[in-house]
Image (cartoon, coloured by chain):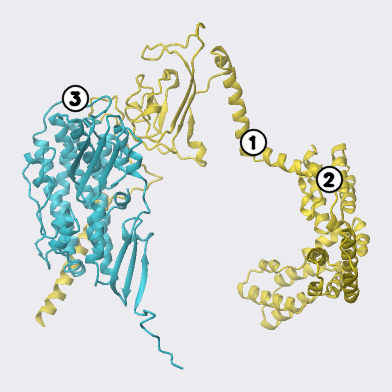
Amino acid sequence: MSEYFIEIVNGVKTFLTGMKMTLQHYNNKEELVATLQYPHEKWPIPERNIGFENSEYNLIRSRLHVDIDDCIGCLQCEKVCPVDCIKIDTIKPPKGTDVDFGITSLDTQKKMLVTRFTIDMAECMYCNLCAYPCPEECIYMVGGPNEHKHEIDYEFSQYKRDGLIYEFADPTEDQLAEVGGESYVESRQSQKQKLEDGSNLEGVVEEEKKAVVVEDSKGSVKKEEDTGLTLAIFNDVGDKPARGIAKKAFQAAKRANMNFDAMADYVNGAINDSGKSSPEMTAAINVIRNFKDESVTINTPVKVSAESSSETPEFLEMASTNFDIKILNGIEDKMSRGIAKKAFTSAKRENLDANGKIDFIKKTLNEADKMTDEIDSLISTFAVSDVPPAVVAPEKEVEVEAEAELFDIKLLNDIDNKMARGSAKKVYMAGKRGNKSSSIVLTQIREVLNKAEMMNDDIDGLLKGIG
Amino acid sequence: MDTTLDKSIVNIDEMVLNMGPQHPSTHGVLRLKIHTDGEVVSKIEPIIGYLHRCFEKHCENLSYEQIVPFTDRCDYLASMHMDHAYSIAVEKLLDIELPERVEYIRVIIAELQRIASHLVAIGTFGLDVGAITPFTWTIRDRERVLDLFEALCGARLLYNYIWPGGVSHDLSPKFIQRTQEFLEYFETQIFEYNELLTGNKIFIERTADVGVMPADVAVNFGVTGPSLRGSGVNYDLRKTQPYSIYDKFDFNVPVGEGTMGTVGDSWDRYWVRMVEMEESIKIIRQAMASLPDGDVHAAMQKKIRPAKGDVYSRYESARGDVGIYIQSNGKNVPLRLKMRSPAFCNLSVLGEIGEGWMISDVITILGSLDIVLGEIDR
């Protein structure tokens, strides 16, 4: 029993000893606390005159630097680097030519031109091995004993990794030509071009897509999906604003599932409206017009008639961005936002139109006593902008009806011929995507099968049965 | 319906718990697969290899000078020791005699590094059992050692200072003076650690009698260094097989005596490190008192190209017995380089001594073994 209490006393005693030590440190903050407020104060670098006599050795391992005028291109540092972060290219003048490269600060005659001296500091591991063998003492870590040569880079941070690649040699073209390095000039130029293209990430991509489009416009290759036609067709157009308008119109037309003639008309209309037409643009539009695509060429008459007028796509676009749940994110109060969202989803489940939804949300909010002027105005503005869809409504309904009318794909399973069944189903799916009615899809199937000479009496009877 | 589980098919008593690889208490990227029965650990499987960098294969493509920066990166808490171990092996292969000054400098640096490494071991061990303040204090004092090294060779962690045949820079009188100042300061600090951690009742309760490693188990598993000495085995290469000039110095080899519990418990392993730092101070003092003059680059060869043959050399690092085996075919790159990693062997004993303890005790035992994953995976 007494042992038990002795242990407790011991525990408390040693605990208090520890606390006492900590308290001493707390009272002696100036002396004993080692925290350094880093960005404001910096850790001192060891002073240069630390007492070493052989100051030719570097004591601070910071960034590598090269005095390129002193470099004789002996490649010693490149060879000794364990991680290969130094890359050096040199050009020797051809025999017989007399070129003077000057002398280094240690009075050595230079015999070649250093065309490239790259150090990747992201790869460097600061072992300092490159500094020792240099006969001209021209590669060194900055700062410390080399402070008279180069100021220290305390933290040479960069936003991009390639900022850590240091190029030291930059010979002029005259210098290169003097030593017969014309081919080097060319390769340097092409490399520069490649780098630029890479950073812009345009050149290569454009080329590929253009090639595809050219193939298509010849009409020899038929693509089944309408993704064959891309925005790349407008890339030839030099005028930037015009290109933008054309691309926008093209996208809108595509979203509205237009056929290519209508698409071309629509784009053309948009361009003419802005008064930005040019021969290149006409060519691009012609590409659209001549584009052949089996699955989309036949379109519902209703649609074509609706879309041929230039206003329709706009309002279709608007309909696609109708009253969205994201709009409710504008409500600041968390509680009412939640209630409104809940109401929105339940209204959506009941297939209410935008105005119905708004009414429902308003009603729910009123019931919860959370209605404010702010929310009211937020939702109501949408109701106002949603009024034009009154015109849309019938159009939409027609689509919905058409969809409802479409027969079940399983009925096509009765087709015996595998190939015929496959093509029929393909047409069916395309029709379903285009919200077409049963009769249109059936005619399309017939056409396709007739074309492929796969039509027989069985299928004919089957299709008639579905119709 | 019978709802009882057939225990012969499904073992519902055992749960496998994955600790790591991203776990603060595993001192690196180590994954412990722990089979637990309740909170009691029934089996531990250390899974390593997350930090593997092909050190040995890589060395076959590097010249002897270029390998030094990579040995630095093996045991990154005691880089000087690895450089020293490697350099001794290469010198043995080259069969060269070093200037006395180089040997003295190396001993001073190696013992300073031992202090720095043990400071991390002690601090993180305290951290593992819940004492946070000692960690900040030991790291603060280790920083002073790193400052000394920075002034010495320009780097704080990966030095590339000890080269085959010499050292990269000479010591200066100012360095000696600053080291002396540090040692005086550090002696008072050891007293503080003892007050704060060693005698603390909670610390003792957490570590004494926990993870007892009997001497025979330690020897059978090849455990070396302070972990072995904690089990009461008086085995230190600096005494039993003196390399460099360690035979010239007077120092003791502390062994675990079971002061707070059983011989070979976690507290003993901790205490051995604590006393070893004091012994290191003794060695540094002696070495600095009799530091001879000389050229540190005298024995350095411009190009290291050893004759055909092989060599194995051993070195007592902060974690134990580092063995370097080099096979040379007469070229400037080694044909084969093999490193015996002390922490690798020390970790292997964890499965043996960690069984039957609770999960929190496994952390204690792992902390007391003081492993460095950079060296284990290499």
Chain of the residue under label 1? A
Q: What residue is disc 2 on?
A: A220
Name the residue located 49 percent from the left edge and 15 percent from the top edge.
A92
Q: Is residue A60 left or right of residue A257?
A: left
Identity of the residue furthest to the bottom in this view: B1
Name the residue located 29 percent from the left edge and 24 percent from the top edge.
A56
- Residue A22 is at least partly visible in this image: no
**Which chain is drawn using cyan?**
B
Q: What residue is disc 1 on?
A: A197
Q: Amino acid at mark 2?
A: Ser
- Colour given to chain A in the rendered image: yellow
- Number of residue marks: 3
Q: Nearer the viewer, mark 2 or mark 3?
A: 2
| Residue at disc 2, secondary structure | loop
Indicate whether B88 appears above or below B266: above
Q: Are marks 1 and 2 in contact (CB under 8 Å)?
A: no
Chain of the residue under label 2? A
Q: Nearer the viewer, residue A218 or A160?
A: A218
Q: Are marks 1 and 2 on the same chain?
A: yes
Q: Is residue A192 left or right of residue A54?
A: right
Q: Tell me the quarter of the image containing the C terminus of chain A.
A: bottom right
Q: Amino acid at mark 1?
A: Asp
Task: Tell me where residue B131 appears, x and y as whole percent.
Answer: 26, 63
Task: Tell me where residue A465 appears, x and y as whole percent.
Answer: 89, 76
Q: What residue is disc 3 on?
A: B298
Quarter of the rendering containing residue B63? top left
- State the separation of the CA atoms marked 2 and 3: 81 Å
| Residue at disc 3, secondary structure | loop
**First in sequence: mark 1 or mark 2?**
1
